[in-house]
Amino acid sequence: MTAFPCSRCGKCCMSLGRHIRVIKTTSPRSFLISVGVTRETLPVQLVPSLVSLYSQKEPPAWETGWCPFLRREAGGLFSCTIYPFRPRICRGFRCMTMRILDRSGHEAGRVKGRSSLVSDDPRLVELWDDAVAPLAGLPQKEFVSRCREILASHGFEVDMFDE
Ligand code: SF4
Ligand code: SF4
């Protein structure tokens, strides 16, 4: 298992403006929010070092539709300004579950969710479609184990990410 390598591209938070809403401002740095997907209501606070970034509510720092707490920093990376208080759905989110490396250690593909491969390598795509995707109904542990075996026999290595 490898720690999930979030690149802070912000893509996963950009579509969450409809689902994460501020219900009430309880102080200049704290809010009550609702999370539509899980129907939760929870109190959150701004990270002290990100208060000034949060106050930027115009492009390029923030754009309509984004989660109200997402901000683009000057260098282009994205930050969650309530990171320690972020909702459960954000804590558990992984935009990929595994990465597949070729013989030279380069990334040949990424797997999203259970078994959706994203790859530009035609050999890997064919192998996945023919031999791995049909196993998607197996229990998770068995699926991962078979997936590793099949890919390894064709020179690929699987890098799984922590839950
Ligand atoms: S979890 Fe994935 S999509 Fe979300 S910011 Fe990290 S790399 Fe980007
Ligand atoms: S609360 Fe933070 S992690 Fe969750 S969608 Fe908003 S910016 Fe992203």
Image (cartoon, helix red, strand yellow):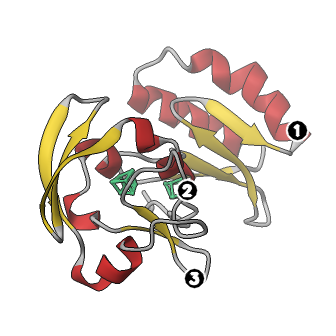
Question: In the orientation shown, which residue stands out farthest toward the right?
Answer: 122
> Which residue is under mark 2?
63
Tell me if residue 49 comes above or below residue 57 in the rendering: below
Is residue 124 found left or right of 117 in the rendered image? right
**Secondary structure under the numbered disc 2 in the rendered image:** loop
Question: How many numbered dots are placed on residues in this image?
Answer: 3
Residue at x-position 47% and y-position 17%:
138
Would you name the residue on which mark 1 appears? 123
Contact (Cβ within 8 Å) of mark 2 with mark 3: no
Kindly identify the residue that appears in the image at 23 percent across and 70 percent down. 46
Where does the image place residue 78, in percent across and percent down from the top left? Answer: 51, 68
Q: CA distance from mark 2 to mark 3?
A: 14 Å
User: Residue 127 at what x, y percent from top left?
Assistant: 79, 30
Q: Which amino acid, mark 2?
A: Glu
Q: Quadrant of the N terminus?
A: bottom left
- Mark toward the start of the polypeptide (2 vs 1): 2
For mark 2, does the 10 Å Cα neighbourhood hold few (<14), some (14 to 19), or many (20 or more) residues?
some
How many residues crowd around disc 1 within 10 Å: few (fewer than 14), some, or many (20 or more)?
Answer: few
Disc 1 or 3, which lies upstream in sequence? 3
Mark 3 — residue?
Answer: 74
Q: Nearer the viewer, residue 84 or 49?
A: 49
Give 140 or 36, whichever is nearer the viewer. 36
Q: Position of residue 39 (x, y in %)?
A: 21, 28
Q: Is residue 60 above or below residue 143?
A: below
- What is the C-alpha distance between the residues marked 1 and 3? 40 Å
Q: Amino acid at mark 1?
A: Arg
Helix, strand or loop at mark 3: loop
Which residue is rendered at x = 73% and y = 66% of the image?
105
Q: Amino acid at mark 3?
A: Ala
